[in-house]
Amino acid sequence: MSIFNKWNEPGGYRQVLDISLPLVISMGSISLMLFTDRLFLSRYSLDAIAASMPAGTASFLFVSFFMGVVGYVNVFVAQYTGSGEREKVGASVWQGLYFTFGASLILASLYFIAGPLFDLAGHSPGVRRLEVIYFRILILGAGPVVLSPALSSFFTGRGLTRVVMFSNLAGAAVNIPLDYCLINGIGPFPELGIIGAGLATVIGYLVIAGLLVYLVFNRENDEQFGILRRRGFQRALFVRIMRYGLPNGVQFFIDLFSITAFIFIVGRLGKQVLAAANIVFSISLLAFLPLVGFGLGLSVLVGQALGRDNPQEAERATSSTLHVTFFYMGVVVLIFILAPEWLMNLFRSRDPSQSDYQSILKIGLVLLRFVAVYSIFDVLFIVYSSAIKGAGDTRFVMWAIGILSIGIMVIPVYILVIHLGAGIYPTWIALTAYVCVAGIVFWRRYSKGKWKDMRVIERSESPPAERETSGRTLEGV
């Protein structure tokens, strides 16, 4: 097949880029918010950067479960769009919103566990105090973080990903300068340090959620998709979303839990080791989140194709996404290999002595080599897990990530550090092994093809005539 045909066919490179690039930019804007947040804090104080990663990751650990559940509305919208059942789109979004309202209250109540939680971490008193402050701000402001994927699924599931991109860019445009001003006390803003970083993050997500509310709830969307008149609670649909969404949320939680546990355990090796690990994770996150954008786009394409009962198109979309993401990650890995010291120097603090910085730099340069190795397998991990999740294979993803992350990474790292007194590098060997094995496992699951017969919507709800009309409409998105 010629590159021209591969570019233009349904599920080809053009369609992948049309759907996924805005999501990549969206994830890039979110990763840039996190990156600059930690960049500014690293230059503010060593304690601030040491506290920001554990506290930020811990808060997102709890948020991730609810985001994973409500984010799966995206696949329902995609499959209903593919099948031509437009009014089920509005009803699906509302079931996600009902879940979001309860989730926001639960998350806010976690304010009270901050002290005991970070007592368990065993970090120095100065770092522990900042961890508690940062965690409490982020968890109180978690409502808009969970609300955003529920609202954005209305657009992403239909392939209208540019709307989500512009909303996220607007949030980043508010967050980044506000972050800098509130941390350092620029102009009329007070110097708040890590408190300012937390407030700027919450305000950024409020902007994103507010824009999406404005764009979703209007008369035109109600006429086409019932976004206002189909707002009633539908028990059967809600239960079906929970059936597939809960495993997706558990998978998100376990994945983040394993990383959080990793960071907490590594933090016991000392402040310099923790700072170096936090910096390297921040750098790798900047590269990783755009990859997640490609995964979200692939789930949409697979969901739409299966909604039209066209698994061959879903296969083409998966193949095209794999090629594009391998190219992207190849460029990123080259940067990790050729310019690691430049990347590390971006986080150089004003506080530590020259000897402190040289120690952090030395550790970080080695850790970036591990990142360069496992980033290639991250492509397999994200692409193939996203493809089968777009079909509804969420339980396998949940169990696979749970068993692999705990068995290959968390338990071995705990034994290495707590019982054997190992240093930082053996722990990153375990992390690399986890990502590599997970990538291979999801490739094998996808290759078996069980996902082709899966649907999250009933087949009887997919009239052939409507599927054909919908399919022709979506090709132009």
Image: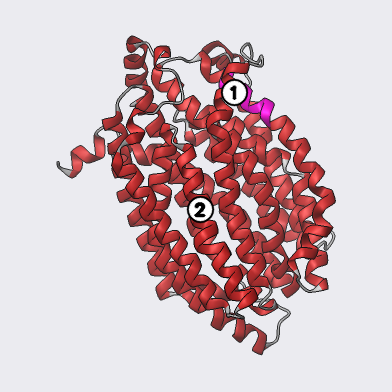
Does 423 sit left or right of 144 as displayed? left
* Magenta-span inclusion, residue 93: yes
Scheme of colours in the image: secondary structure
The quadrant of the rendering that contains the N terminus is top left
Main secondary structure along the magenta-highlighted residues:
helix
* Magenta-span inclusion, residue 223: no
Tell me what residue is drawn at x 42 percent, y 68 percent: 372
Question: Is 465 drawn above or below residue 101 in the view shown?
Answer: above
Please state the horizontal and vertical placement of residue 319, each as a whole percent of the image: 29, 44
Residue in front for this viewpoint, 331 or 411: 411
Residue in front for this viewpoint, 78 or 58: 58
Q: Secondary structure at mark 1?
A: helix
The residue stretch that appears in magenta: 91-99
Please state the horizontal and vertical placement of residue 309, each as a whole percent of the image: 32, 22
Which residue occupies the extreme left position in the image? Answer: 1
Please state the horizontal and vertical placement of residue 15, each as a whole percent of the image: 34, 36
Which residue occupies the extreme bottom position in the image? Answer: 355
Q: Is residue 45 visible?
A: no
Tell me what residue is drawn at x 72 percent, y 59 percent: 55
Label drawn at residue 239: 1
Q: Toward which corner of the image does residue 327 lie, by quadrant?
A: bottom left
The residue where tag 2 is placed is 403
Please state the horizontal and vertical placement of residue 432, each as a whole percent of the image: 46, 66
Q: Amino acid at mark 2?
A: Ile
Query: Of tags 2 and 1, which is closer to the observer?
Result: 2
